Image (spheres, helix red, strand yellow):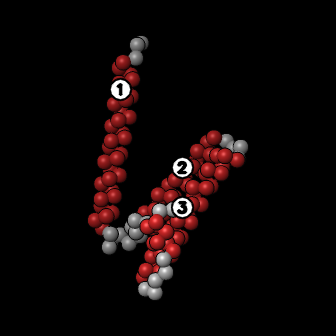
Amino acid sequence: MDYNVYCSIFTWNYSMNYQIKNKNHLVGFIISLALTIVPFTAVLYLDINKKILTTLIIVCALIQIFVHLIFFIHLNNIKKQQWNFISLIFTILITFILITGSLWIMHHLNHNLMHH
């Protein structure tokens, strides 16, 4: 575990705000750990349908994204974090454009360069 993470989770302070922040980090860490262990255990030990397994992995990943946004990036109060939220939406938009454009280019290159 990183030293800064250890200090932020396990350091005791008498300021109530600081303790609540540490408690939120600890809760977020435990939820994230559970959302990592569940799909890993399902892949490793359970013999289930691949579609169900893929759905489980995707659902756990999406839930974990929201856990990170709320507990670690502190986007639970959008009015206070308006610029951070706008930056997040812009980042998601740019990432979507890059991925979609790359897939579109690769599809058309494959279609145009393959021998018919």
Circle on res. 58: 2
Image coordinates of residue 49 in percent, x first then y, are 67, 42
Look at the numbered disc 3 and give the secondary structure of its residue.
helix
Mark 2 belongs to which amino acid? Ile
Q: How far apart are labels 3 and 2 at the CA level?
A: 14 Å
What residue is shown at x 70% (from left), y 47% (from top)?
45
Does residue 78 appear left or right of residue 29 in this picture? left
Camera-near label (3 vs 2) is: 3
Q: Is residue 19 above or below residue 33?
A: below
Mark 3 belongs to which amino acid? Ser
Image coordinates of residue 25 in percent, x first then y, are 48, 70
What residue is shown at x 45% (from left), y 72% (from top)?
8
Circle on res. 108: 1
Q: Between disc 3 and disc 2, whose residue precedes? A: 3
What residue is shown at x 43% (from left), y 86% (from top)?
15
Name the image quarter holding residue 70: bottom left
Q: Residue furthest top?
A: 116
Mark 1 belongs to which amino acid? His
Query: Is residue 77 or residue 39 the one in the foreground?
Result: 39
Q: Is residue 13 above or below residue 60?
A: below
Q: What residue does disc 3 label?
A: 32
Does residue 87 appear left or right of residue 50 in this picture? left
